[in-house]
Image (cartoon, rainbow, N blue to C red):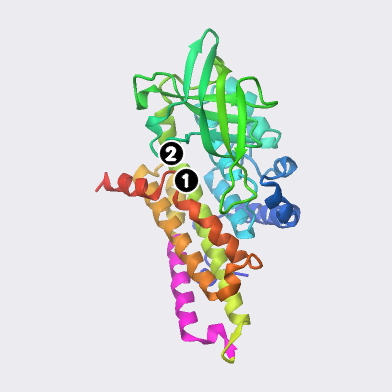
Amino acid sequence: MPTPGLDGYVEPWRKPEHDDLAELARTFFTKEVLPHAARLEQQGHPDREHYRRAGELGLLGLSVPEEYGGGGGDFTHEATLLHEQTLAGEGSLGIAVHSGIVTGYLNDYGSEEQKRRWLPGLVSGELVGAIGMTEPDGGSDVQAIRTRAIRDGDDYVVNGSKTFITNGILADLLVLAVKTDTSARAHGISMLVCELTGDPAGFRRGRRIEKIGLHANDTAELFFDDFRVPAANLLGTEGSGFIQMMRQLPQERLVIGVGAVAAMQRAVELATAYAKERVAFGKPLIGHQNTRMVLAEVATRTRVSRAFLDDCIQRHARGELDVATAAMAKLYLTEGQCEVVDRCLQIFGGYGYTTEYPIAKMYADARVQKIYGGTNEIMKELISRVL
């Protein structure tokens, strides 16, 4: 059903090809992944086969150039896919990281040999990608990372640990932030591409982290103990890692914003439908003024958020999305997601607090949006710097 308040709304960047992509993605998520939702939540990670199937359908690496097996599109195509995933209620596959972040690092900073070596596998789903930035002693302050990489002949020897790594259980390819110069902060950070197939010597996957939400999406600790990475796997040059991350973070925050708005839309749809069906005091909930007022407010917040998101997507597609605006999007849209989902859950009453209704899962899943990708407190700091 159309989202109340967004009936007839068409994104200014949308073309017929996006409609076709949306239909394909919707079918894949609803018919091939969602039937396994309960099992995936129990096992705590997605099926590797679902990544391969997404690759077969051409749903991975949509913005990767065709010469590397990708879709040859841009971020609008990635946004379409991620929007449909959230709107369908599918939360197991870490495509937002796999395609929305990892392929971007390789495409923008990888050598020709590196691109041809790794991008086709990510696009086909044979490889699952992850990025390792957050550490046990720090998350948003990426300059303070402690994982070290010391050059030893043709290798880097890595020691340290990472935590809260999305796709960490299944990851075959990890873009890892390390300190190659411990005497410097930002300028001492480099990015290494680590091949993890077969769990090589010196590398260990820790526990699968239990979370209050996103139960089917794997999040793990990773440990490195004299783990050797070929020097040829250095992404760009030594000391350029911080700049690379700062240039990629606006897209990462926009990826989060896409999921936030899609969740808002889904929450409004679910709450509106329920309000029309549920009878209280002799009439449907929507017949009560308070319910109508709440729905009017969340529908308005969703419509405004959609317009802001689309403006940011257009800016990003033109290469004009600056750090502060991306931070505004992450801040405003994730705060909006948590508020809208919370208010929609209230319409369900006690049923909203049971796992029988999807709004409860959406409530638990939403909270982390204000944390990863840089906490919303950090977003405010970034925004304040341009005021």
The amino acid beneath tag 2 is: Gly
Write down the residue under mark 2.
139
Q: Earlier in the sequence, mark 2 or mark 1?
A: 2
**360 left or right, relative to 140:** right
**131 left or right, relative to 51:** left
Q: Find residue 14 and report its horizontal and vertical position in percent.
A: 55, 55
Q: CA distance from mark 2 to mark 1?
A: 8 Å
Check contact, mark 2 vs mark 1: CB within 8 A. Answer: yes
Range of the magenta residues? 283-305
The answer, for residue 325, to whether it is visible in the render is no
Crowding at label 2, few (<14), some or many (≥20) Cα neighbours within 10 Å?
many
Q: Find residue 100 and report its horizontal and vertical position in percent.
A: 55, 42
Quarter of the rendering containing residue 168: top right
Q: Which mark is residue 266?
A: none
Marks counted in the figure total: 2
Q: Find residue 80 and report its horizontal and vertical position in percent.
A: 58, 52
The amino acid beneath tag 1 is: Tyr
**Front residue of this view, candidates 23 and 154:** 154
Which SS type dominates the magenta stretch? helix
**Front residue of this view, candidates 8 and 223:** 223
Q: Is residue 287 above or below residue 240?
A: below
Inspect the magenta stretch and tell me whether residue 285 lies in it: yes
- Tell me which residue sits at (50%, 86%) in the image: 288
Write down the residue under mark 1.
372
